Image: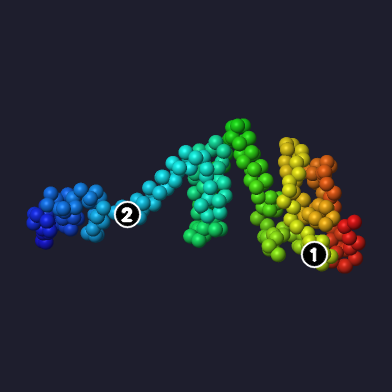
């Protein structure tokens, strides 16, 4: 059986293991650095001295940042400066942490997708959950602000996880949009994605973003396969010039016989 002796006072450890020796040495009266050894060394027998572990420093940094965000009511991403404030929700700081872990500007962002098992657990946990009218109104206000701040992400196709196509830095939701964009670009019209939202009423007040805007014609363009009652509500009181491109016009663009927008 191996027993260990203290390097400061020579006292033998009570138990035949290195951990017992390290604990005694950390608080030994003969140890000149006794007041600095505030943390018991690890079980591997390594000295840690007066420095906190990386995990402790990380937790302290998160705690300090939470207190700072709560005090200033500013929840800004440190990578892209996005505002993650959820307005009166206690989970604003959690929203900030979740965003930063997935932020495209974060070089160490988490890229592992959620497993199907985790998704099933979340579905079971969230199924049947009911919200108060006040909470529903808060969520609607937050979603409305998100649409206004990021109109390029607003699309009904997002609900179905439609595959996006990126051309000239613009995201397209369908081949029809690509065909019209290429035609307008060849005509020198310089079409751009519409970034301005127009209010309309459909069960409640909403925002409508046409597909394209052509500055030289001061014209908004919507690419549409079929028309619904909601579409008619969008177009009924539209305050600007709007051109609806339907299937017939797309076929003309394919054949090269499209007569133009005016």
With 81 as the anchor, is 6 left or right in this view?
left
Which numbered circle lies on residue 53? 2
**Numbered marks: total:** 2
Residue 134 position within the rendered picture, expressed as x and y whole percent measured from the top left? 60, 32
Residue beneath the point at 12% across and 49% down: 29
Which residue lies under the disc numbered 1? 185
Closer to the chain start, of discs 1 and 2, is: 2
Helix, strand, or loop for circle 2?
loop
Quadrant where the C terminus sits is: bottom right
Residue 135 position within the rendered picture, expressed as x and y whole percent measured from the top left? 59, 34
Which numbered circle lies on residue 151? none
In the depicted view, which residue is nearer to us: 95 or 115? Answer: 95
Helix, strand, or loop for circle 1?
helix
Residue beneath the point at 10% across and 58% down: 5
Is residue 113 something that shows in the picture?
no
In the depicted view, which residue is nearer to us: 122 or 5? Answer: 5
């Amino acid at each position: 059986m191996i027993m260990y002796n203290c390097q400061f006072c020579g006292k033998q450890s009570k138990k035949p293991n290195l951990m017992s020796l390290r604990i005694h040495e950390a608080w030994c009266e003969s140890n000149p650095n006794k007041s600095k050894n505030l943390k018991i060394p690890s079980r591997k027998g390594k000295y840690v001295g007066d420095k906190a572990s990386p995990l402790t420093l990380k937790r302290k940094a998160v705690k300090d940042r939470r207190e700072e965000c709560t005090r200033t009511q500013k929840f800004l991403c440190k990578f892209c400066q996005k505002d993650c404030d959820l307005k009166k929700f206690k989970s604003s700081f959690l929203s900030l942490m979740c965003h930063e872990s997935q932020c495209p500007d974060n070089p160490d962002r988490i890229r592992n997708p959620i497993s199907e098992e985790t998704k099933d657990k979340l579905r079971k946990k969230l199924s049947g959950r009911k919200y108060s009218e006040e909470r529903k109104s808060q969520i609607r206000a937050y979603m409305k602000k998100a649409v206004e701040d990021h109109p390029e992400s607003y699309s009904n196709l997002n609900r179905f996880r439609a595959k996006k196509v990126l051309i000239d830095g613009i995201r397209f939701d369908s081949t029809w949009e690509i065909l019209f964009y290429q035609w307008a670009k060849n005509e020198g019209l310089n079409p751009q994605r519409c970034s301005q939202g127009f209010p309309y009423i459909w069960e409640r007040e909403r925002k409508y973003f046409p597909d394209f805007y052509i500055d030289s014609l001061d014209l908004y363009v919507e690419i549409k396969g079929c028309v619904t009652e909601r579409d008619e509500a969008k177009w009924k009181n539209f305050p600007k010039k709007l051109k609806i491109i339907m299937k017939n016009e797309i076929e003309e663009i394919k054949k090269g016989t499209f007569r133009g927008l005016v």
